[in-house]
Amino acid sequence: MNISVPKETVPGETRVALTPAVVSQIVSSGLEVSVGKGAGMQSSYTDSSYKEAGASIAEDTDELFNKADVVLKVQKPGDDEIAMMKPGTVLITFLWALSDQPLVEKLQKAEITAIGMEALPRISRAQKMDALSAMSSIAGYKAVLLGANALGKYLPMLVTAAGTIAPAKVLVLGAGVAGLQSIATARRLGAIVEAFDVRPAVKEQVESLGATFIDIPLEETDTETKGGYAKELSKETRKKQQKVLHEHVKNVDMVITTALVPGKPAPKLITPEMVGDMAPGAVIVDLAAEQGGNCEITRPGEDYFTDNGVIIRGPLNLPAAMPIHASQLYAKTIQALLMHFIKDGEMHFDFEDEITKQATITHKGKVVSSLFT
């Protein structure tokens, strides 16, 4: 069985689906691995390192896709990539299928068996395959560094001969994996941190990292999905939430927003009025920019100053800013998922299994994932 890893073509994508170390382990299990020429260069993995690991280097992209039984990617496939895959090919990558119906239809029509790395169920058996959490952790870490770089202040308290510098105040909105990593990183850098999440269950995690949890009583008690994600709140509840957060936002130096609702636009947590009450030089880093942003005036992919001097950063694809570790972590999760499907050297699909049923988006020309039922 041939497993192929093409070079990513999306602008700005520096990650690669497999690292040489993981290739070596896959090859040792009796499988064949082909890697596109230069696929790992932006992650600091050379073609020669893949050869040493037992992979063959494919000069021709057409041939790479055509002979592949399994294609491993990071980003969604383009139309040209789908066209190069033969019917029955297994594709494993981030698909974001719930918010991209046209892509699902193309994969269905091409008879590609498409497995979404973001579609894994949140169960203990799937933890080692959880690429979403691995990438979110990197994004949360990097967000603090981006914020600190833009902030014209120290984060820690400093006592100097010229006077004492007070520590910066950081507010993290959303305490999932990215939010918790942001909290931990900001605390390591010496900031005073507070955080908010609609899920009361995360309060203990926030406080264990040394941050203060903002407790906003909500009329809605069912704020968490079965998979552990935050649910979309009613308009009335959001208004109440924004009113309380407004008082906190105007007193902090940095806000990091991480709130996402699977398959839907990012919830709006910060209004223009809230931004208008922030101090000049304050920074917002909106990790939800790719889904429209948690701040109403975020410009995805841009950094800019507001009229009152607030810096708003809307970074895209932050994990690609740390390609070495991002690729290492992604490769291990994709290897774990791949091994879940492989039986006796072949891909095997048991749709009675929860992981297979949820993560497999299309198979034999049909949409089969339980996410769509």
Image (cartoon, rainbow, N blue to C red):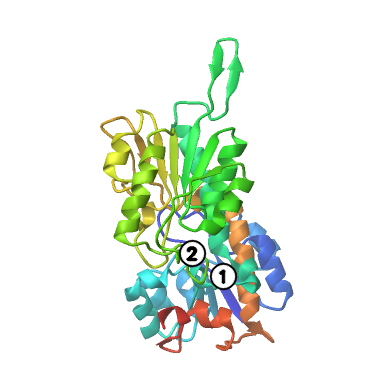
Q: Relative to the observer, which residue lies in front, 55 or 16?
A: 16
State the SS at label 2.
Answer: loop
Residue at the right extreme of this rendering: 28
x then y, percent, for residue 206: 57, 49
Q: Is residue 16 visible?
A: no
Quadrant for the C terminus in the image: bottom left
Depth check: 69 or 363 in front?
A: 363
Q: Position of residue 82 (x, y in %)?
A: 40, 75
The location of residue 239, given as percent across then percent down, is: 31, 52
Q: Residue furthest top?
A: 161
SS at badge 1:
loop
- Kindly identify which residue carries mark 2: 229
- As drawn, the label of residue 95 is none
Three-letter amino acid code of the residue under disc 1: Arg
Q: Judge the density around disc 1: few (<14), some (14-19), many (≥20) Cα neighbours within 10 Å.
A: some
Vertical position of residue 42 compared to residue 5: above or below: above
| Residue assigned mark 1 | 122
Return the residue nearer the eye: 317 or 281: 281
Q: Is residue 77 above or below residue 156?
A: below
Residue 190 placement, left or right of 310: right
Amino acid beneath label 2: Tyr
Q: Is residue 108 above or below residue 207?
A: below
Residue 186: x percent and y percent?
A: 56, 39
* Callout 1 touching callout 2 (CB < 8 Å): yes
